Amino acid sequence: MKLVILDSYTENPGDLSWDWLKDIVDEYEIYESTPGDKVIERSLDADILVTNKVPVDRALIEKLPKLKFIAVLATGFNIIDCEAAKEHGIIVSNIPAYSTDGVAQLVFAFLLELTNQVGLHSESVNDGEWSRSPYFCYWKTPLVELRGKVFGIVGFGKIGSAVAGIANAFGMKVKAYSPHTKTYTGFGKVDFVSLDEVIETSDVISLHCPLTKETNGLVNAAFLSRMKKTAYLINTSRGPVVNEADLRNALESGIIAGAGVDVLSSEPPKEDNPLIGAKNCFITPHIAWASLEARTRLMNIFRDNVKGFVSGKPINVVNK
């Protein structure tokens, strides 16, 4: 049985090991990345095809007669045509719930940067501004205390509930919108309210919804215009949930106070992406999932997925 990994680098740039593969499959090939014109060639003999972001669509599936299993090195599996895979008897698995704590942590890294501007003030000190100051302290932007503020959550899965727990620890009032009843526990006090109430009453809105037809472009000019002028938007879910041109306009026009985003509509972004260089907008290159601890959990779940398939007991199947 042959396994092929099309884009290994982001999961394992060299600080983890693939050696365990030799104990499970007969043969494997690992590519750091695969350009579009090489996908068919590299996949052709694979029984197991592993991808992080390389799309596997119907046209590709129909060209791979040996393929039996597609393993996605991520939680999201929208890059796979799961229906076509099912029609061809191909199992698709993903990696669930490996980065919950890391994503929740980054949400508050954004929020604390927006409210305290640590980087800006540290830079000013290093530039000598404090040494030249006639006063014992100064601040270059308004400083915002989180206790008592309303933290709004759109989408309340495992990550949303983890974020709620941290917001409660800061003494914030948590309001959440979810179209589905939730049974998660341990996140403290949360008021489940309408989306309208989250938009209009929150001092912070953090997005944790999946990308669907309903959420694509959810945060647009109309959404942003209803937020408080002092509010912040944080997106660690999926880039296309936010209309980036509308968000830039809202930031530049003072419609909202700031934003933190770890995801963009296309990744890597084009140089003319509207959010690059936008006022009070902090952007990280899709790193919420990427701590060594989280990637180690991902690797372990991936190993279990491969073992499960090879033993005839597949797990984390998304196209049943």
Image (cartoon, grey):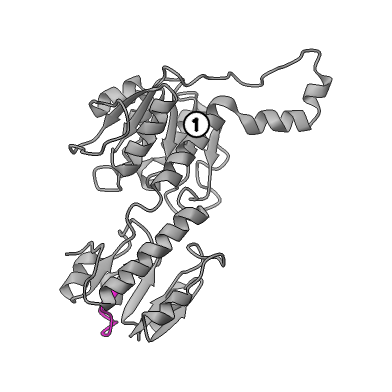
Q: Please tell me in which quadrant of the rendered image residue 214 appears.
A: top left
Which residue is identified by label 1?
111
Q: Residue furthest right?
A: 132
Q: Position of residue 213 (x, y in %)?
A: 24, 47
Where's the N terminus, which quadrant? bottom left
Query: Is 66 part of what is drawn in magenta?
Result: yes
Q: Specify whether residue 116 is in view.
A: yes
Residue at 47 percent of width and 32 percent of height: 249
Query: Would residue 74 be counted in the magenta stretch?
Result: no
Question: Tag 1's secondary structure?
Answer: helix
Q: Main secondary structure of the magenta part?
A: loop
**Residue 39 visible in the shown view:** no
Residue 138: image location, x then y, percent: 70, 17
Q: Nearer the viewer, residue 147 or 239?
A: 147
- Residue 261 x, y percent position in the rendering: 47, 41
Q: Residue at x 35, y 75 (%)?
A: 49
Q: Amino acid at mark 1?
A: Leu
The residue range painted magenta reads 61-69
